Image (spheres, helix red, strand yellow):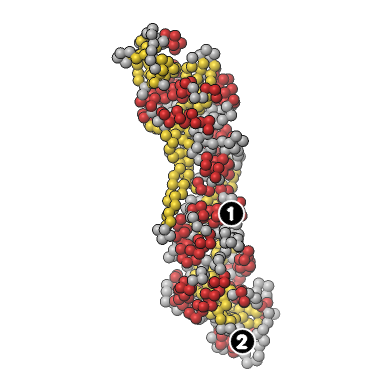
Amino acid sequence: MWVVRPAQLKDLPDIKALASALKARVSSTVPADEAKLAEKIEYSRRSLAGEPDTAGNERLMFVLENTKTGKVHGTAGIDARAGSGHPFYNYRRDALIHASHELGVSSRVDVLYPSHALTDRTLLCSFMIAPELRGTEAFELLSRARLLFVARHRALFAKLMAVEIQGVQLESGAVPFWDSLGRHFFNMDFETADAHSGALSKTFIAELMPPNPIYVTLLTDAAQAALGQPHAMAAQTCDLLDREGFQIGNYVDIFDGGPVLEARTDMLRSVIGSHRKTLRTGEEIRGDVYLVSIGEGEAFRCVLSVLSEGLVETVKMPVTLQTQLNCSHGDELLVVPL
Amino acid sequence: MLIIRPLQETDLDDLYRMAKSAGKGLTSLPANKDRLAGKINRAQETFNQRCAPEAGMYLFALEDTELKQCVGISGIEARVGLEEVFYNYRLSTTVNASRELGVHVRTPTLHLSNDMTDTTEICSLLLSDTHRKGGSGLLLSRCRFMYLDDFRRHFSEKVFAEMRGVSDESGRSPLWDALGARFFDMEFSQADYLSGVGNKSFIAELMPKFPIYLPLLPGAARAVIGRVHDNTAPALKMLQSEGFNFNGLVDIFDGGPLVEAFIHNIRTVRESLNRHVLISRKPINLEVPAEERVMISNRSFRDFRVTTIPMQCIKPDTVSIPAEVAEALDVSSGDLVRLAPLKDAGRSPIQMVAH
């Protein structure tokens, strides 16, 4: 059985192995460095414990565990406030019309403006999953469990949410958008910049990023083509988030030009569609598969289960699952259809 | 004899013929008779002080008195950018540095500017192919510096020239193709023509207003920023020897450089001197090589005339000139004239007198 639960320090070796197996870009939000990773897990634990210094800047990390083996196969995070107290950088895609009445011409000019507008939105991040699980129910469980957590702890999170989607990277490892823009200013290759952005304070972005807007037409054709495009590997993530109600907005990543998906927190399918139900013990369970979450904070767990709806906001759940989740008759669940 | 005088209505046909043979690249003088007639008219208004001083457009003709033909022109625009907006790019440096990472990156950047607004420009130099020898080009260009100095209150302290940038035989400009054309769907030659007929600021309004980071442009475009067209190299050299320097501004279309100087620092101004005219009855051999000639101006605002005479004519207090030269300059004995060297390599009149 798959369960999503808060990350713990004991998950560190599994997460590290997963991060290094996935060559894709996750480094900026899941550091490969063991000490940094431990720090991130610890920060998540302290956020869930409600320690005062994390208040307002909670950064949570969840893992997907196979309960049979105890092994972790994926991670998913939420930053309560993008930037966590620092500026959060993006480019905003905008347009200017260059027109001359006298010459009878008018043309649309696409411009990238440096922006901090997404700072303080709630950010879904640090998503990685073992490749063989992509597109499976476990994949959906891992991604959406976070939204059930949000629904359950709504006050912790902002009105608006954002997700940065990995941008285009070629087989060779080259990142066209970076090579056409960032490289000139940061004077380093993409991996280095990306690793810095995961590990260091973001001050270096403020220091090195070009301070003025960028005309899209001056970028290379490859960079223009990559602008706002998700990496092929992120397609399923995009589909899932699209079904949740996320939309591609006007923001792109400053490093790889990948799109930022945006949504109103209260309009997300998992938030609107989730209901509080009281657990009843039953024998014969027939019905649909649901994401079922129980517990708050560090005790938060989320699994997939067939539920049968009872009367007066009650549901019945298989006893085996109840045992595994350590819950019983009368407990309150938050459920949403898969 | 070759003589500089104000451009007048009768020069229209000669001017049109010159503009036509000059072809592309001469933005300020398009081969269009109405426009040229308009320019002549504006010059006449200026010399006769029938327009505001800052609206002045001083155009001088080089006349071959034997052919009775105008064989070249040069001009001074009293102030640019007052009616229309005058645009340039300023070539500057953006530094991004991170001490934490030990990164220090310098990025050359073009900033759109109107810095030359209200400054005097020397412009519109055009010389017929038949008269390219014997220092005619120098006379045509340098005579303006004597005028600028004698009538300084009509001009700004600083004067500049826009140098033609790089384009190939077919009229393609690498900078235009990489920058202007991206924002404005037009060939450089067409944009250039529109500039000449007074639409430059319209086009400029379509150009990018935010700084342009040069690493985003292709190498061919970066290479021509601040560089002059091969045909303009001699003109640049001449202005440099006068003390003009690149001022960091370039043309927004072709990237050609602007060079500027303070009038009081211009070599022709510094090395010139005034003398009283003495009309000589003795014959003077006027046919000496350009190296031995000096410019002589009558210092008239309304009927500015300049020609060249042998250096030997300069005496300690006077300058001896034959009657025909005096007549051409419209001066008589006792009038104060201004003398300045014609060629860089030549000895200046001051040195001449000292010996």
Q: Mark 1 points at which residue?
A: B221
Left or right placement of residue A310 versus residue A124 in this view: left
Q: Which residue is more in the foreground, B2 or B299?
A: B2
Q: Determine the CA span between mark 2 and mark 1.
A: 53 Å
- Mark 2 or mark 1, earlier in chain: 1
Q: In which quadrant will I find the C terminus of chain A?
A: top left
* Label pair 2/1, CB-CB below 8 angstroms: no
* Residue A115 in view in this figure: no
How many labels, in total? 2
Left or right placement of residue B64 versus residue A101 in this view: right
Between circles 2 and 1, the one closer to the viewer is 1
Q: At numbered mark 2, what does the secondary structure look like: helix, strand or loop?
A: strand
- The image quarter containing residue B163 is bottom right
Give the label on residue A80, or none. Answer: none
Q: Mark 2 points at which residue?
A: B321
Q: Position of residue B285 (x, y in %)?
A: 67, 86
Please name the amino acid that badge 2 sits on: Ile
Q: At numbered mark 1, what does the secondary structure look like: helix, strand or loop?
A: helix
Instruction: Return the chain for callout 1.
Output: B
Q: Please, is residue A276 above or below residue B111 in the view?
A: above
Residue found farthest to the left: A312
Please name the amino acid that badge 1 sits on: Ala
Task: Tell me which residue sits at (46%, 65%) in the image.
Answer: B198
Q: Position of residue A8 (x, y in %)?
A: 51, 19
Task: Tell me which residue sits at (63%, 64%) in the image.
Answer: B230
